[in-house]
Image (spheres, helix red, strand yellow):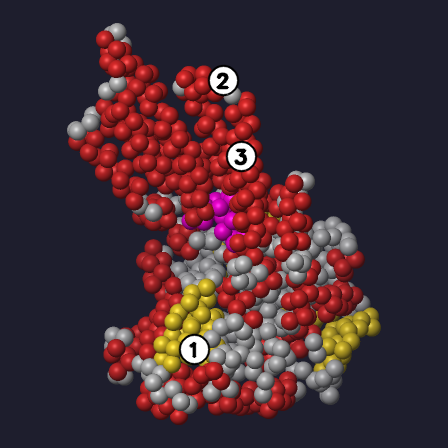
Amino acid sequence: MSPLLERHGIKALDRLLPALALGASLVLPAALHAQEAPHHGGKVTINIHADAPNFDPLASTEFAVHSRLGLALSRLIEWSTGPEVGYGEFIPKPGLAKSWEISPDGLTYTFHLRDDAVWQDVVPVSGRRFVAADVVATYEAIREGGVQRGLLSAVDRIAAPDDHTVVITLKRPNVVLLQNLAHQNMWILPQETFNGGYDRNTTVIGTGPFVLESDEPGVATRYVRNPAYYGRSAAGEQLPYLDEVEILPLKDLNARIMAFRAGQIDIWFGPLNLTQMEGIKQAVPDLQDIQTIAGNQTELYLNPSFEPFADIRVRQAINLAIDRLALGEVVRGGGAIGAPVGPALTTQTLPEKERIALYGTPDHEKAKRLLAEAGYADGLSFEFTVLNYGEEFVREAEWIQQDLAEIGVTAQIRLVDTASGQALASEGNFQALFLIMSPFAEADEYFTTHYLPGGNRNYTKVDDPKLTAMIEAQQAAVDPAERVAQIHEIQRYIAANVANPLPVWAAVLLHPAHARVKGWHPMMTQGFPSLPEVSVTD
Amino acid sequence: MLTFALRRAILGLLVLATVAVLVFVAFRFVPGDIVNRQLEEAGAVTPALLAEKRAQLGLDEPLPVQFYNWISGVAAGDLGKSLWSGRMVSDQIGAALAPTLQLSVLAILIGGILGIGAGVAAALWRGTPVDMVLRVASTVFLAVPQLWLGLLTLTALAAIGYFIPLPYRGFTAAPLLNLQQVVFPAAVLALGVAAALSRLTRSAMLEVVGADFIRAAHARGVSPSGVYLRHGLKNALIPVLTLLGTQFGNLLSGTVIIERIFNIPGLGNLLFESVANRDYPVIQAAVLTYGLITILVNLAVDLSYGLVDPRIREARA
């Protein structure tokens, strides 16, 4: 056992238990759900720990908005779901587009739209047929003023040659376009909303499985089945199965736990740790214990404008000081070691063995040598800005602080609220910063935001021409296997030559659901894509 | 009396104006703004987009201009629009005010009855085990944080198999359900009020029961209950009323946490979220509303002195 593990009081068996529990929980639910046939009717209640400020998908990327919109709206391309699909695995599935073709040069995407989709029967759209002009109007509005406009930055032209065809022409090949169109913020709206026909802040009109019935902030968001939804199950049954869905905005964690125990919540959404889960399981022993690796990971940014961190040897020393595996087991009780591309993206992140070699093999002697070579043989001290994402996250920061002390580095923690932390990050006003990254669903999103000049998450001002060229090259790699190889190579380059930010840990994410809920498969995208196929047993 | 009320009202307005300036300035110096929150999850945001969003919301204007725009709107009765939801702030405050007022009034009622009753009882049975128990209980409930008491209440209810019904319903829509939802948070808030009131009532009663007029009442043959309640308690009420006013202010601040724990969509919940989201117009309006309620309650308490004590009424006249 490593001295660091001993210091933190970990026994070898303790290290294995969370992994065994996670493995069992990943396998057991699927076995338990060898299903009876789903039937129509019933209601489920989901908690989302925030209200939707409004329902305009172009105005913010707020999860509370897009999670709710997903019940009523559709995208051109959807995420496949099901027991065979991993939580972070994007497999494109026809949405409002029933099929698509890509030109050999990778510049032209032709989408054939479904002709059986109609808008919900809400004025002024009032159940009219969905047409290509709706897609064009939505995407043009996004390009003009939507917060998600970056997802269409490679697009040159969007055209609708007829009512059921949309042609998107790119400025340069970009193989992630399909995934961008399936992004959690890319809902298609009726063209009327862009002509002043209705206020999309308050009115939701979609082609999705449920119709928004009411939204009372702080109380509940209620939906009823959309009888005109185009979706069919694999057996050809009309979807959705449920008659009603209710979303409760319960903001206090203990109140949510009590509500779940009482059966007032059927499907859990949001933060929950393993200790809390154990408590819930005692009260609800037959719950579905669905666990995944979180789509977001913790990251440590070392600002090169603070002199010591300008030297890559110091950054590498800090990397070598942190015992991530022990941290993950003790603080989080499970999960996966981080990488430049988060571990939830199972095909795009580096293989686990390599992630452990790069980020999970602490070596304090080597770290001290690197510090000495960089001129910090007596150690150094810095201000460690930590965003307050909750108790466990702060404990991660304290663990890092303790590990760094082992190599003579003093990190003085400064805890700030998330809005303050985001401002400090974007201003570059920190020496070291610890935060939880957004749940990106594509390696390209990690790369473009973290490592390209001007990237939204490039808080440490990385500007490496070679890295930029590598990132642009993978965007144009049409062959999937070749692209994955390039994505892996980029991560190796980042580990060796950039070492900033330092990925730390992706926690285990818990998605408990009551046994009465069938067909529930959480996915790493907002809007609950498996909800149309969810049914209840009573 | 009218002059007195007017003087206090003008003073109240000055206090409100000071609160308005303080809350406006203080939050502008806290790092982060609504745009950071709105684009928090975005992977593809450019600095130009951030600047554009700030300009749309008027956050790029100099602070004095922003303050003038806001305060002139408030003076005209327009609290503006929420930066987060786009809804009218007055609508949001209006919707959130009813649950908070209901919770606070219920808590004050429960706390007042329990606290004054316990204080009188402790004074009448001074030095007995009853007095001892009541004094210990009041000290305990003064010391226990409301957050902890709230969580304990939820857990204790769950332990006996009772869960507060969800989602929240207003009193007019579903009175019985609403009472089930608010009685426990009100009780949690009330215990702190009751503890403070009982201690003060006890000492005020002890002071009064030794007074000459009480002995005179006894000598006139007034029944013991008449002596203590009609003569004793009435004269002991002045400091108790003062405390009741200040407790109402404390109670309002307590609702911020209690509303979250018990899922009450009130002003406290609204303020909590607007601070996290840096939704300046809502923060400012919510704080002003809290300030206004506190000032009105204190004004009412001041005026009530005259009703309780004719000497004060005479002096003001």
Disc 2 residue type (three-letter): Ala
SS under mark 1: loop
Measure the C-alpha gap from mark 1 to mark 3.
Answer: 56 Å
Give the letter of the chain under mark 3.
B
Residue A103: % across, % down: 74, 84
Q: Which residue is mark 1?
A: A504
Q: Range of the magenta residues? A: B259-275
Q: Earlier in the sequence, mark 3 or mark 2?
A: 3
Decide if residue B145 is on the left or right side of residue A132: left
Label 1–label 2 contact, CB within 8 A: no
Measure the C-alpha gap from mark 1 to mark 2.
Answer: 73 Å
> Which mark's residue is nearer the viewer, 1 or 2?
2
Disc 3 residue type (three-letter): Leu
Q: Which residue is mark 2?
A: B317
Label 3–label 2 contact, CB within 8 A: no
Give the letter of the chain under mark 2.
B
Q: Residue furthest front?
A: B315
Q: Residue furthest right?
A: A161
In percent of the image, x 54 and y 88: which residue is there?
A490
Q: Residue furthest top?
A: B220
Badge 3 and badge 2 both on one subunit: yes
In percent of the image, x 36 and y 36: which residue is there?
B193
The crowd level at tag 3 (other Cα within 10 Å; few <14, some 14-19, many 20+) is few
Residue A487: % across, % down: 55, 86
In percent of the image, x 66 and y 49: which residue is there?
B68
Depth check: give the residue in front, A206 or A365: A365
SS under mark 2: loop
Q: Which residue is mark 3?
A: B11
Residue A489: % across, % down: 53, 90
